[in-house]
Amino acid sequence: MKKIILIIFGFFTCSLYAQQVSLRTQYLFDNMMVNAGATGSKDYIPINLNFRKQWTNFPGSPTTQMLSANGKIAPNFGFGGVIYNDVAGPSRITGGNINAAYHLRLDNTKKHRLGIGIGANLSQHYIDADRITTYLPNDPAVLQGYNNKLVPDVNFGVFYYFSDIGFAGISANNLVESRRDLFDFDYKLYNPLARTYNIYGGYNINFKRESKSRVKLSTLFQIIETGTFQIDLTALYEWNDIFWIGASYRLNDAVSGIAGVNIKMFSVGYSYDYTLSDIGKYSYGSHEIFLQLRLLNKKNSESQGRTPWLKRNRIYAPSL
């Protein structure tokens, strides 16, 4: 029966590695999730909710929910956090992350900035015995052979951004590589979280200012110390700051279609991943929904406050 537990843990381990190599298609809308140095880099407070169902119709396929928020608590200091729940088969990882970043001004115009951030992470690892079928009822190897474990760790990031034109950064997760024996029997099975390095960058090609239309290009390169790596390439066209449409490619894994819309202080995005790997023969692809609420948006409040007076001047100004 211990061999069965080892097989289950093998699937559990795969799901952990999948979480380390982020499979979020709409990562471009939440930079803090990739790099702690981006915490508080916006002029507003973004509250993001993300739901992803991977490999639909595949038994035990991963399902992930994330809720994050970040903002400035001082002119050069940002603070934020995220809570997440990742389920794959009988395994589950639930946790939270708190990030803080200091933003250096690189010029007098305040357009060039460098964010240096650090974060603390705490995750709980759990296996649901009720979802495991054994040959022997109430098998002690299953009922007593696993524990809930809290695993602490640390992440770090450096994030450069140039106004609303471009950005680049490098970050690292699981720096401590905390070790926890997840099971209490002869076979020692440790938390397999390994250090993950992210190289992340993007550039916006802006068109006429009147239309506010632009093309957003971004790339995310991730390396895990186990020898695994992943490359994501994304291109989006945003029209008049109202809606966007685009595509993304994940090396040897999936090609994705992305679409979304801005409604005042809200943004809603959807992506569908067509799986290119062998698992695509047994699943219907992956779905991801992204929601964002923007609070204390200075641009919106200023434009709304000035517009009535501009109109009044046009109407009542005496003709010359």
Image (spheres, rainbow, N blue to C red):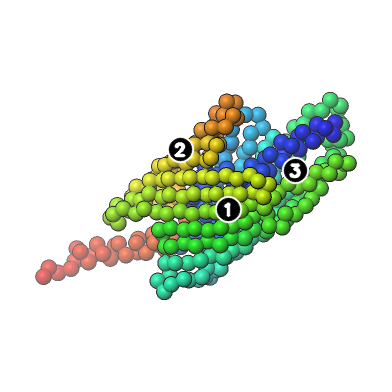
Q: Point out the image quarter for the N terminus.
A: top right
Horizontal relation, residue 79 to residue 266: left or right: right
Mark identifier at residue 126: 3
* Three-letter amino acid code of the residue under disc 2: Gly
Horizontal relation, residue 148 to residue 209: left or right: right
Mark identifier at residue 267: none
Q: Which comes before the other along the chain, label 3 or label 1? A: 3
* Three-letter amino acid code of the residue under disc 1: Asn
According to the picture, the residue beneath numbered tag 2 turns out to be 257
Q: Which comes before the other along the chain, label 3 or label 2? A: 3
Q: Is residue 34 above or below residue 114?
A: above
Q: Please tell me in which quadrant of the rendered image residue 177 appears.
A: bottom right
3 and 1 marks in contact (CB < 8 Å): no
x, y percent for residue 243: 38, 45
1 and 2 marks in contact (CB < 8 Å): no
Q: What residue is at 38 percent from the left and 46 percent from the top?
A: 237
Q: Residues within 10 Å of mark 3 (few under 14, many from 20)?
A: some
Nearer to us in this view, 306 or 47: 47
x, y percent for residue 16: 68, 43
According to the picture, the residue beneath numbered tag 1 turns out to be 198
x, y percent for residue 319: 12, 68
Horizontal relation, residue 307 to residue 64: left or right: left
Per the image, label 1 sits on a secondary structure element best described as strand
Q: What residue is at 86 percent from the left and 26 percent from the top?
A: 136
Q: What residue is at 53 percent from the left and 65 percent from the top?
A: 115
Per the image, label 3 sits on a secondary structure element best described as strand
Kindly tell me whether residue 78 is visible in this rendering: no
Which residue occupies the extreme bottom position in the image?
A: 108
Q: Residues within 10 Å of mark 2 (few under 14, many from 20)?
A: some
